Image (cartoon, helix red, strand yellow):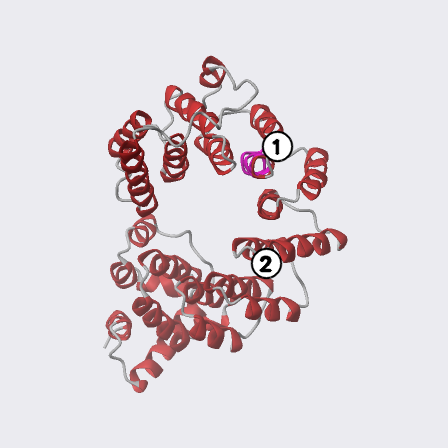
Amino acid sequence: MNGRSLLTSLLNCATPFTTRLSLHNLTTHYFSTNSLPLPPPPEFVKLCSQGLIKEAFTSFTSVLWSDTNLFSHLLKACVEKQSVCLSKQLHSVIITSGCFKHRFVANHLLNAYAKLGQLETAVLVFDILPKRNTMSYNILIGGFIQKGDLDAAFKLFDEMGERNLATWNAMIVGLVQYELNEDGLSLFSQMHELGFSPDVFTLGSVFKGCAGLKDLNKGKQVHGFVVKLGLEEHLIVGNALAHMYMRSGNFREGEKVIRLMPSFSVAACNTLISGMAQNGYSEGAMVYYNIMKKAAFRPDKITFVSVISSCSDLASLAQGQQVHADVIKVGALADVPVISSLGFLEEENVLCNLKGSSKYQNKNSREGKVWEDSEVCSRKS
């Protein structure tokens, strides 16, 4: 039996121990005779990107043993394809061939299990890693956070001898994601005290945490820090900062932040629209929605949920019908939150029609001037 048939047999999960022992001898020979890694073959990378994992494996067997780092492409493809079975088959190959001793390959295997939600297997892989590094810990922490097991994530975080920015970000983002905003902000303070400089992802989560708590004072403090770092105009930071101000009811500052950004975007529109809708300024939300359309931006489900809510608050059947038409036009009817919002809007309009008058008489009109349409359109990216 030649090397390719041995590997193909193993990939099909039908390999006895004696065959795996032969495979170990075969790959040991490859490692000893091929020491210089080559660039990834374009066709191999293409097959992996298309999810053709078995084809990539069987077509480039000899190349895999000359550069075991290529297993990372196969494992990434397993994650993209959401295939636990193929990941386990590759796991078998990696262990049997001795590739597991290479930390880069072992970490990619760990990452595949973590991303696929196979935490029990990921922990087993982590426990037998020959050499753990910060990346190994970060991968498993990310897996625990993805599963919502923050206690396990914290336990691993506390065990780490050395942390990097990615470690702190994973924990802060995870805590804020699960609305443990105070814990997230506390961890940010610890990170800052230890001399770590935040990046845009850290700051985006911190502002989200401030918004969740409606802690305007803390948000302003971090805003001052952002200005010193020169990151106020960054897309992620700017939108998160504007959202914090809008959520806290400070619309003027929120608009000011958006204006300072170098380009207008769907995310910026959504920040303004959702901020106004959530605080009861429905007319302002509809004004920005119309500006967004005139600027030829494509609304998404976040836009529609906020806009439909505003139509309901205003009890405007005409506006509701127009938004419904826009939803159909962009193909957003498949989104459950949008469908639910439309259903609620329909119920509201039926009630209003039965009563013969609107429940709302422009109670939500907002003081202050919104941007002129021409100003926004001219800044469209």
- Residue 238: x, y in percent? 58, 34
Q: Main secondary structure of the magenta part?
A: helix
Q: Image check: 173 left or right of 75?
A: right
Q: CA distance from mark 2 to mark 1?
A: 28 Å
Q: Magenta stretch: residue 238 in it?
A: yes
- Name the front one of labels 2 and 1: 1
Q: Secondary structure at mark 1?
A: loop
Q: Image check: 135 left or right of 25?
A: right
Q: Magenta stretch: residue 151 in it?
A: no
In the image, residue 10 sits, relative to residue 370, either above or below, namely below
Q: Identify the disc placed on residue 298.
A: none
Q: Image check: 229 left or right of 365?
A: right
As drawn, the residue found furthest toward the bottom would be 18
**Residue type of the residue flagged with mark 1:** Asn
- Residue 137: x, y in percent? 57, 66
**What's the residue at 75%, 55% (across, down)?**
194
Q: Which residue is mark 2?
A: 171
Asked whether 73 or 82 is in front, the reply is 82
**What's the residue at 62%, 29% (across, down)?**
253
Characterize the local packing of mark 2: few (<14), some (14-19) or many (20 or more) Cα atoms within 10 angstroms.
many
Asked whether 325 or 222 is in front, the reply is 325
Number of marks in the rendered image = 2
- Identify the magenta region: 233-243
**Residue type of the residue flagged with mark 2:** Met
In the image, residue 303 sits, relative to residue 187, either above or below, namely above
Q: Point out the tag, 2 or 1, that comes first from the N-terminus.
A: 2
Do the CB atoms of the residues marked 2 and 1 lie less than 8 Å apart?
no
Among the 4 quarters of the image, the one containing residue 9: bottom left
Q: Secondary structure at mark 2?
A: helix
Q: Identify the disc placed on residue 250.
A: 1
**What's the residue at 55%, 55% (across, down)?**
179
